[in-house]
Image: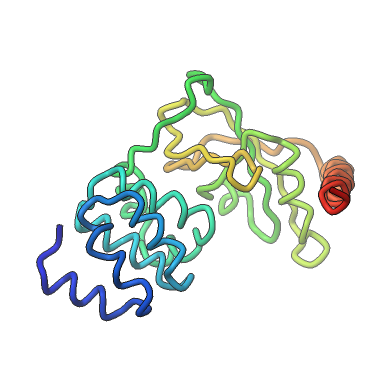
Amino acid sequence: MPNAISIELIEEQVESWSKKYVRPAFAGDVEAAGRLTISLADHRRGTMAVAMWRAKVPRAAFREFFESVWNHDHRHVIAAAGTRRRLQSMFRYADFPLPDDLGDKVQVWRGTSALSFRKASAGLSWTLDRDVACWFAMRFADLNGLPLVLSAKVSRSDIALHTNERSEHEVVLLAPPLCTVDGNAAEWALVYERTERQIRADQAAGLGQ
């Protein structure tokens, strides 16, 4: 746990309604860590994640905070970490458990637009679902251009986090994998349209309940 001055400085930088969760979260209270996540303004969550990692907050509380922040504000986390090396250290410290059925070798995909092959392949967020990758590749392709769907086979040990909170079957890779382009824009567009129809149907079914 950081010294009293560090805690006081952290408390001064958060919203008044968040202060009561800071000390318990840094002491390892998992519930307080979760409440701290939702009480902070979006732009403060990344810097708080870095502060908790630097303080070596007990791992269970850090996991609770870090996974939630990554799921909802990963851009802020990446910006606050500053370097890929620091972000890798944060994920290693979190030591997220992986599903038992994930297997030793895992097929993953990544969908992007507006990025070169090199930049796209260096991304952290991949998915176990090819349709999700196609959707990401094409959702802004008309505006951005350069849609890409990349495919790679990675070892289980290469995966730092698996989460399906947003129904995206996301996996985080700490090192860029060897990958290839999987398919073409015409086929990706067909998958995108099919996925969009399913999303609209699911939304309509939900509204009808």
**Which residue: 21% across, 77% down?**
9
Work out whether 195 lies above or below 138: above
Quadrant assignment for the N terminus: bottom left
Q: Is residue 189 visible?
A: no
The image quadrant that residue 164 belongs to is top right
**Which residue: 27% across, 44% down?**
59
Work out whether 106 lies above or below 132: above
Q: Is residue 115 left or right of residue 31?
A: right
Q: Position of residue 158 (x, y in %)?
A: 43, 32
Q: How is the image coloured?
A: rainbow
Q: Is residue 84 left or right of residue 101?
A: left
From the viewer's side, name the closer residue of 56 and 19: 19
Work out whether 198 lies above or below 140: above
From the viewer's side, name the closer residue of 193 and 82: 193
How many numbered markers are drawn?
0
Q: Is residue 198 left or right of residue 32?
A: right
Work out whether 107 lies above or below 63: above
The image quadrant that residue 51 belongs to is bottom left
**Which residue: 40% across, 32% down?**
97
Q: Position of residue 123 (x, y in %)?
A: 53, 50
Q: Position of residue 201 (x, y in %)?
A: 88, 46
From the viewer's side, name the closer residue of 44 and 74: 44
Q: Position of residue 79 (x, y in %)?
A: 43, 66
The image quadrant that residue 131 belongs to is top right
From the viewer's side, name the closer residue of 152 and 34: 34
Q: Is residue 127 visible?
A: yes
**Which residue: 51% across, 28% down?**
154
Q: Is residue 191 left or right of residue 110?
A: right
Hey, which residue is sitting farthest front in the picture? Answer: 209
